[in-house]
């Protein structure tokens, strides 16, 4: 069964939910650790997507700079 990939915004919303729950501190330690791990994975995925977006945005500028230097 394939899962639909979550959008960046959906992942950020989930991170915010996790942070809110963890800040509350009302869960058993094991559940908090599970949520923390989920949040860490989401942060990693969001970071990777941001790096990809940044490289896509910078690519035209690099090409233009190189053409100006020729």
Image (spheres, rainbow, N blue to C red):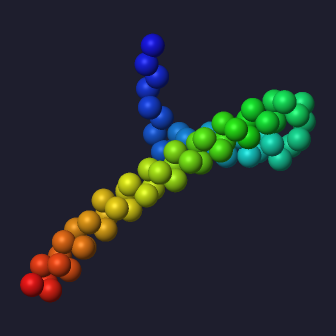
Residue at x 70% of width, y 38% of height: 37
Q: Position of residue 52 (x, y in %)?
A: 38, 54
* Snapshot quadrant of residue 55: bottom left
Residue 29 shows in this picture = yes
In the picture as drawn, the residue positioned furthest to the top comes out as: 1
* Snapshot quadrant of residue 24: top right
Q: Is residue 2 left or right of residue 23?
A: left
Location of the N terminus (image quadrant): top left
Q: Is residue 67 left or right of residue 16?
A: left
Q: Position of residue 60 (x, y in %)?
A: 22, 68
Q: Is residue 23 left or right of residue 59?
A: right
Q: Is residue 27 above or below residue 69?
A: above
Q: Is residue 29 left or right of residue 14?
A: right
Q: Position of residue 61 (x, y in %)?
A: 25, 73
Location of the C terminus (image quadrant): bottom left
Residue at x 88% of width, y 41% of height: 25
Q: Position of residue 20 (x, y in %)?
A: 76, 44
In the picture as drawn, the residue positioned furthest to the bottom comes out as: 69
Residue 13 shows in this picture = no
In this rendered view, identify the residue nearer to me: 51 or 19: 51
């Amino acid at each position: 069964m394939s899962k639909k990939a979550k959008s960046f915004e959906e992942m950020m919303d989930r991170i915010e939910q996790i942070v809110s729950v963890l800040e509350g501190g009302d869960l058993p330690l094991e559940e908090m650790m599970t949520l923390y791990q989920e949040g860490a994975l989401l942060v990693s995925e969001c970071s990777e997507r941001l790096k990809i977006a940044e490289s896509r945005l910078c690519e035209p500028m690099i090409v233009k700079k190189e053409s100006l230097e020729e």
